[in-house]
Each structure stands twice: as structure tokens, then as C-alpha cells.
Image (spheres, rainbow, N blue to C red):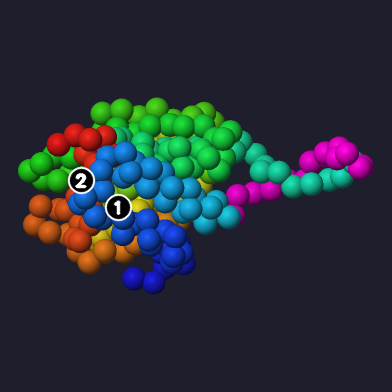
């Protein structure tokens, strides 16, 4: 589905690191580092339109007007728990960013998300908001998270995922056509258990070493 708000990454470093993520032999420590590195590389692309304003700076030579990020900066909002793995990758680029959290769990029968926690930086309506989740599978969690952020007044929203299924992208686009969506790699499909194929398994379990 062509859409000016959807950005699928093509950078060789991102593709290489995603291939390492897929490998079932990649252990927890390396997996966690790769998630962070991919988030940084994707963040570099996703944040290319942050607003700038000229400020006065005194160099060792003279005083000049030079651009710095404008406004109330960035809000990073991981979807718990797997989204936590991407936070430090974005903070490496924008250390002044504020971090919120949205907690969702998925009903194993219906695969639908339920909110159990939502804490967002204030004033959320003035910030560029990056919602993080390594996997965009059914799209249920992503849609719910963006719903909550909009209900709290958030407007300028970017969603970042490392792997996406076409079904999840379609659902997120239809529910929130105004947001920017950044995807590391578009995978083939969901299976009957709503897992992405070929995917990389359960991102949360592999980041945190749980089963």
C-alpha cells in the first residue's frame, strides 16, 4: 500500500542487523544490543524533520546564530514491554527527550490489546511523539497506543517498528492515516497465532531473556 506517511528502511546496516535479529542462535545480550542499534539507525531517519530554530552561540572565534532543535523537544513512548528495548537507541540521538510509557497486554484468545498503564510527558500536545514497538503484527497494540496518546492531546505522532506484517500496517494506516510510520523491514504475513512470518519470534522474550 503506497502512502506518503509510510517509510520502509533500505539502509544496508539496518537490513544486516535485522538479519542477525532473526537468527534463533542470537542470544539475549546480542539481541538487546541489536534492537538498540537498529532503533538508533531508524531514529536518524525518523527524526530528520524535527523543527529547528536559530539560537545565539559564542564560538572561540565569534558569536553566531546557529540551528538547534526547537520547541518542547521529543517524547519517546515505548509500548511495554518490548518497546523498552528501543528507548536507549533513540535517547542516544536526543538525550533531552522525555520518556512516557504505555502498557498493553494482548488477550490470547482474541489477540486484542488491553491498557493497564499510561503515563505521558507533559505538555504532550507540544511534543513530537515517537511510539516504539519492535513488532507491528496485528496492529491492535499500535492502534490502541496511538488512540491513548491522541486522547491525551498528542498530535505529532511517529510510530517506529523494526518488523511489520502487511495486516498490521493496513490496520494502523486505516485507523490513523495522519501519523508517520517507520518500518525496518516489511515481512510476508501473520500466521494463525498472529505471529509475524518469517519474523523473529517474541521480541519481548528475546530482549529480556524470558520464555
In the rendered image, is residue 155 in sight? Answer: no
* Labels 2 and 1: the sequence-earlier one: 1
Tag shown at residue 202 = 2
Check if residue 61 falls in the magenta segment. Answer: yes
In the image, is 57 to the left or to the right of 135?
right
In the rendered image, is residue 75 in sight? Answer: yes
* Region in magenta: 49-62
What crowding class fits label 1: few (fewer than 14 Cα within 10 Å), some (14-19), or many (20 or more)? Answer: many
- What residue lies at 60% left-to-right and 49% top-to-bottom? 50
Residue topped by disc 1: 21
Quadrant of res 74:
top right
| Percent coordinates x, y for residue 175 in the rendering | 32, 54
Check if residue 84 falls in the magenta segment. Answer: no
Quadrant of res 71:
top right
Q: What quarter of the picture does the C terminus occupy?
A: top left
- What residue lies at 31% left-to-right and 55% top-to-bottom? 20
Tag shown at residue 124 = none
Q: Secondary structure at mark 2?
A: loop
In the image, is 50 to the left or to the right of 28?
right
Quadrant of res 33:
top left
Q: CA distance from mark 2 to mark 1?
A: 11 Å
Q: What quarter of the picture does the N terminus occupy?
A: bottom left
Q: Is residue 121 above or below residue 48?
A: above
| Percent coordinates x, y for residue 82 in the rendering | 30, 39
Amino acid at each position: 500500500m503506497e502512502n506518503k506517511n509510510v517509510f520502509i528502511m533500505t539502509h544496508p546496516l539496518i537490513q544486516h542487523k535485522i538479519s542477525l535479529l532473526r537468527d534463533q542462535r542470537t542470544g539475549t545480550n546480542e539481541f538487546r544490543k541489536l534492537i538498540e542499534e537498529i532503533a538508533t539507525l531508524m531514529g536518524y531517519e525518523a527524526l530528520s524533520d524535527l523543527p529547528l530554530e536559530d539560537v545565539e552561540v559564542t564560538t572561540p572565534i565569534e558569536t553566531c546564530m546557529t540551528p538547534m532543535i526547537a520547541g518542547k523537544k521529543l517524547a519517546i513512548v515505548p509500548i511495554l514491554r518490548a518497546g523498552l528495548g528501543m528507548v536507549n537507541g533513540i535517547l542516544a540521538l536526543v538525550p533531552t527527550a522525555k520518556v512516557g510509557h504505555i502498557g498493553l497486554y494482548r488477550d490470547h484468545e482474541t489477540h486484542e490489546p488491553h491498557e493497564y498503564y499510561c503515563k505521558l510527558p507533559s505538555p504532550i500536545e507540544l511534543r513530537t511523539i515517537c511510539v516504539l514497538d519492535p513488532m507491528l503484527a496485528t496492529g491492535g497494540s499500535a492502534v490502541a497506543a496511538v488512540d491513548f496518546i491522541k486522547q491525551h492531546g498528542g498530535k505529532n505522532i511517529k510510530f517506529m517498528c523494526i518488523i511489520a506484517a502487511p495486516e498490521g500496517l493496513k490496520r494502523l494506516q486505516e485507523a490513523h492515516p495522519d501519523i508517520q510510520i517507520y518500518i525496518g523491514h516489511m515481512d510476508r504475513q501473520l500466521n494463525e497465532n498472529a505471529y509475524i512470518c518469517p519474523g523473529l519470534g517474541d521480541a519481548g522474550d528475546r530482549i529480556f531473556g524470558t520464555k
